[in-house]
């Protein structure tokens, strides 16, 4: 496959995602610019990411492995774009990775404990950095998913407000995989309620974000009020080969 063909495919994929985002906004009576896209690049081919970045089509990217992300964005073909994009950490942050995360990422979207927050605050302070962070909500009710229980989110937010080097600016949540529409609406709706309660007042002094929705459910998330959607597979999907198409 030539580079030009692949770039055309990637642009087509991205255009389709943006069109669906716009349609979801229109159905909800929201302006298109009220929702931003984080292109999840953690599993994407670096050459694919570079093709879209070179065309000026990426503004925010999401990664979930600190060491891997730092390494791949500091060498070709991605090193040329590292400082031009806003880099979000969207995975579970281990405290022993806090130093590297504070150094490399522009925003941490997955704070889920006081212990992690304090470690990150110390590292950000060493860098003289005020680091925007989102608190991850545990929306699914499953122990296998990271995040703070919704009823304890306000308590964690109060702690974050007292940390001098972190800037709490919203919530992030991941809905249960395969949840039916009614359950998606319930989970996303709960996150929106908390966001309005806790970050409505703060929105007067800083940009606040509600990060909900991935490739399979971002339209429902936008309907619920998400301002930041995280999409990877729908953007970086490769066309099926003829063998794949005919496989039963």
Image: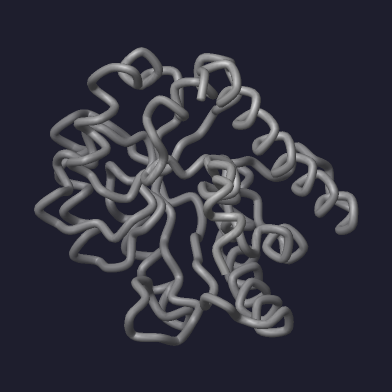
Would you place residue 108 above or below residue 179 in this image? above
- Quick one: 233 or 147, which is closer to the camera? 233
Q: Position of residue 24 (x, y in %)?
A: 81, 54
Would you place residue 71 above or below residue 207 in this image? above
- Quick one: 241 or 17, which is closer to the camera? 241
Horizontal arrangement in the rendering, residue 201 relative to residue 121 (left or right): right
- Quick one: 197 or 75, which is closer to the camera? 75
Q: Quadrant of residue 127?
A: top left
Q: Position of residue 191 (x, y in %)?
A: 59, 71
Horizontal arrangement in the rendering, residue 186 relative to residue 206 (left or right): right
Tell me the quarter of the image containing the C terminus.
Answer: bottom right
Q: Position of residue 178 (x, y in %)?
A: 58, 78
Residue drawn at the location 59% of the way across and 48% of the way down: 234
Residue drawn at the location 25% of the way across and 30% of the way down: 72
Residue drawn at the location 36% of the way across and 69% of the way down: 156
Q: Position of residue 165 (x, y in %)?
A: 28, 42
Would you place residue 87 above or below residue 35 in this image? above
- Quick one: 70 or 166, which is closer to the camera? 70
Horizontal arrangement in the rendering, residue 11 relative to residue 52 (left or right): right
How does the figure colour the protein chain or chains?
one colour
Q: How many marks?
A: 0
Tell which residue pokes out farthest to the left in this image: 96
Would you place residue 16 above or below residue 202 in this image? above
């Amino acid at each position: 496959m030539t580079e030009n063909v692949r770039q055309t495919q990637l642009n087509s994929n991205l255009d389709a995602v943006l069109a669906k985002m716009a349609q979801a906004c229109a159905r909800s009576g929201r302006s298109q610019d009220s929702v931003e896209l984080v292109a999840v690049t953690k599993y994407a081919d670096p050459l694919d990411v570079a093709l879209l970045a070179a065309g000026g089509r990426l503004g925010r990217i999401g990664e979930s492995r600190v060491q891997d992300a730092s390494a791949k964005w500091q060498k070709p073909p991605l090193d040329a774009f590292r400082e031009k994009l806003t880099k979000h950490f969207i995975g579970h942050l281990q405290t022993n990775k806090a130093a590297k995360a504070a150094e490399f990422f522009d925003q941490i979207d997955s704070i889920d404990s006081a212990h992690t927050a304090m470690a990150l605050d110390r590292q950000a302070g060493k860098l003289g950095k005020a680091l925007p962070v989102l608190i991850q909500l545990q929306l699914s009710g499953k122990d296998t998913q990271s995040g703070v229980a919704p009823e304890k989110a306000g308590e964690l937010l109060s702690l974050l407000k007292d940390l001098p080097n972190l800037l709490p600016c919203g919530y992030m949540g991941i809905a249960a995989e395969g949840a039916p529409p009614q359950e998606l609406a319930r989970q996303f709706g709960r996150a929106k309620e908390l966001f309005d309660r806790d970050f409505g007042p703060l929105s007067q002094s800083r940009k606040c974000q509600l990060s909900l929705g991935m490739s399979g459910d971002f339209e429902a998330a936008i309907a619920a009020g998400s301002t930041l959607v995280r999409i990877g597979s729908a953007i970086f999907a490769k066309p099926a080969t003829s063998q794949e198409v005919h496989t039963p």
